Image (tube, rainbow, N blue to C red):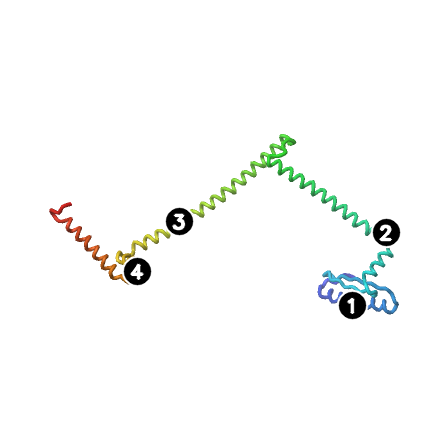
Amino acid sequence: MRRIEDATSRQVTFSKRRSGLLKKAFELGVLCDAEVALIVFSPRGRLYEYASAPDLQKTIDRYLNHTKGTSANEKTVEQPAAGVQMCRSEATALKHKIDAIEAYQRKLSGEGLGSCSAHELQELELQLEKSLSCIRQKKQQKMVAKISELKEKERKLLTENSVLREEYKALPLLELATAAAAERSPDGAGVEEAEEDEWRRHYMEVETELVIGRPGSSS
């Protein structure tokens, strides 16, 4: 007899044998008036149980009382005690490690150096120099990344500024005057008057330049 390798066949066999086992336990309890308790765990950890008594726990307690004082029961009692002792030992070892780490951290902060030897002080100095070097390197990387980010923002702003300048230069003078008049008059009234005023002002400037440029005119 050996383990069934195929998982499907193994599950089918388990279901059949489990049903047969529960049936036999039931028949034994009914036919022979015996107190029967059955506990089965499937390969996936599912629990199947049967008890001819009203409470399965009472049957288990009866079994424990019956086997009390035997070597098997003493072994069961000794195992938890050994587990507790092992946990205590591990906790003590962890406490010693934590104390050592905290003492080392205090020494790195400059505390409790009176008990350190020259060799220990040298090792602490080397460790601090190494840590300081790593910190400076990380700081430099952060600063370089920030400078690159600021330069990229500056480049974008200069590009946008250049585009706005070109758009501003491309606007005709009359269009600028019309836009200004429209801003002063939200409902759009007076746009034509603004255009006439602009042309009149331009005409007067040209006339003034001509008068000034004539021979014999006063400067």
Q: Which comes before the other along the chain, label 2 or label 4?
A: 2
First reached walking from the N terminus: tag 3 or tag 1: 1
Which of discs 4 and 1 lies nearer the camera? The answer is 4
Mark 2, mark 4: which one is toward the viewer? 4
Q: Quadrant of residue 168?
A: bottom left
Query: Tag count in the figure?
Result: 4
Residue occupying image coordinates x 13% and y 47%: 217
- The answer to whether marks 4 and 1 mark residues whose Cβ atoms lie closer than 8 Å is no
As measured in the structure, the alpha-carbon distance from the residue carrying label 3 to the one carrying label 1 is 80 Å
**Going from the N terminus, do you reach mark 2 or mark 3 first?**
2
Disc ID at residue 19: 1
Measure how far apart labels 2 and 1 are at the Cα level.
Answer: 34 Å
Q: Secondary structure at mark 1?
A: helix
Q: Are marks 3 and 1 in contact (CB under 8 Å)?
A: no
Which quarter of the image is occupied by the C terminus?
A: top left
Q: Which circle marks residue 71 in the picture? A: 2
What crowding class fits label 4: few (fewer than 14 Cα within 10 Å), some (14-19), or many (20 or more)? few
Q: x, y (%) of residue 16?
A: 77, 68
Q: Where is residue 192, by image quadrant?
A: bottom left
Tag shown at residue 155: 3
For badge 3, the amino acid type reads Arg
